[in-house]
Image (spheres, rainbow, N blue to C red):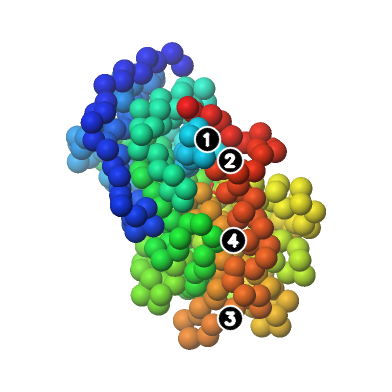
Amino acid sequence: MDVEIIIRPDRDTLVRPERIEHVEFGTLFTPNMFHMKYSGGNWHDAYIEPVKHLQLHPGATVLHYAQTIFEGMKAYRQKSGDIVLFRPEMNIARMNMSARRMQMPEISPDFFLKAIKALVETEANQVPELPGTLYIRPTMIGTAPQVKVAASKEYLFYILTLVSGPYFLGTSGRDPGAVSVYVALDKSRSCYGGTGGIKAGANYAGTLETTSKAYAMKCGQVLFLEARDVPYRERRVEEMGGMNVCFIKNGALYTPRLHGTILPGVTRDSLVKIAKARGIEVHEEDIPFGWVEDGLADGSITEAFACGTAAVVTGIKSFHFDDGRDLAPSSAVPGPITQQLFDAIVGIQFGDAPDEFGWLHKVL
Ligand SMILES: Cc1ncc(COP(=O)(O)O)c(C=O)c1O
């Protein structure tokens, strides 16, 4: 893919929140964005320019049939001043996997990485220090006007960046923190043969009602179970609205195996590799909810945590049910393994620990 990126940004506006911990995640956009069009079977017209509103025909496929996919990754400012990306090739491969499933055009991985690096370089002075990060949101939408269920012939690909602090307000970003999680027994986010394994916008739209309900109950996330009409204890644990889930039982790490209905998280994969390298036994397997319920009730599940780019590693202090029940892991939160894994991944990302797996890509 040989597309020239024309760079004509706003270099004067500086986004500098007083306290990064007080910034609501996902709201503080930096001044510039990358954008590029697709038509006639090719990508073309690539720019880095000030963020602008889109002009879309009201019949665009994204507006009617949710033909939209996205990614979420971060740039980190290390103590040395270097700015790095964490395993960007995984996000790029996942975005192209999402594109294939949603009948959208792929982007050459080399060009994709070049575009991300060019934007992060442009926004380098906006990248905050620990516990802040620059959140990067590549997005693709179908733009051709067409009120007919068929793939668009035209697309827009763009990348936004945001100055970000901790995902959960009230946590510091300097430690795992802790949230309560609402267990949804009457809604699922994904099904066999569906789109749960990719990052399609529609997956998230379907969770908003349940997420609002969780927030009203002072829960930070929703735990979804597989979509199967059997007693809830037999249904497999899947993941949360925006992050994967792990449990610690008898010192071993358990996380649902990937079977197409949950997002293959970059953080999940990284923690599995870190845990194995530290001698922690790892089980990626089907986890019926009854296993979780029993392990919480008898104290054998000592820790549970959420993991994702945005949440990093966040301790789960309790699982809350519609009938008012609350079940908590038996260790104080965050537990020792949660803390160990948080320290390990954050250490690599911010340069306090060696990049033992070769995961970092230097931007500047
Ligand atoms: C539904 C869902 N699961 C899991 C994750 C975690 O994935 P990652 O670690 O790649 O951010 C995310 C966030 O991207 C997500 O939206």
Residue drawn 56% across the image and 69% down it: 316
Q: Residue at x 48, y 34 (%)?
A: 81
| Disc on the earlier residue, 4 or 1 | 1
Could you tell me how far apart the alpha carbons at marks 2 and 4 are, in whole angstroms?
25 Å
Q: Which mark is residue 245?
A: 4
On screen, residue 128 versus residue 49, left or right, reads: right
Pick out the residue farthest to the bottom: 324
| Distance (Cα) linking label 2 and label 1 | 8 Å
Mark 2 or mark 4: whose residue is earlier in sequence: 4
Residue 167 drawn at (x, y percent): 43, 57
Amino acid, disc 1? Ser
User: As drawn, is 186 to the left or to the right of 246?
Assistant: left
Label for residue 327? 3
Question: Which residue is at 66% across, 83% downward?
Answer: 297
State the CA–CA distance, disc 3 to disc 1. 43 Å
- State which mark lies toward you, 3 or 2: 2
Cα separation between marks 3 and 4: 16 Å
Pointer 2 with pointer 1, Cβ within 8 A:
yes
- Residue 281 location (% of width, % of height): 78, 58
Front one among 18 and 228: 18
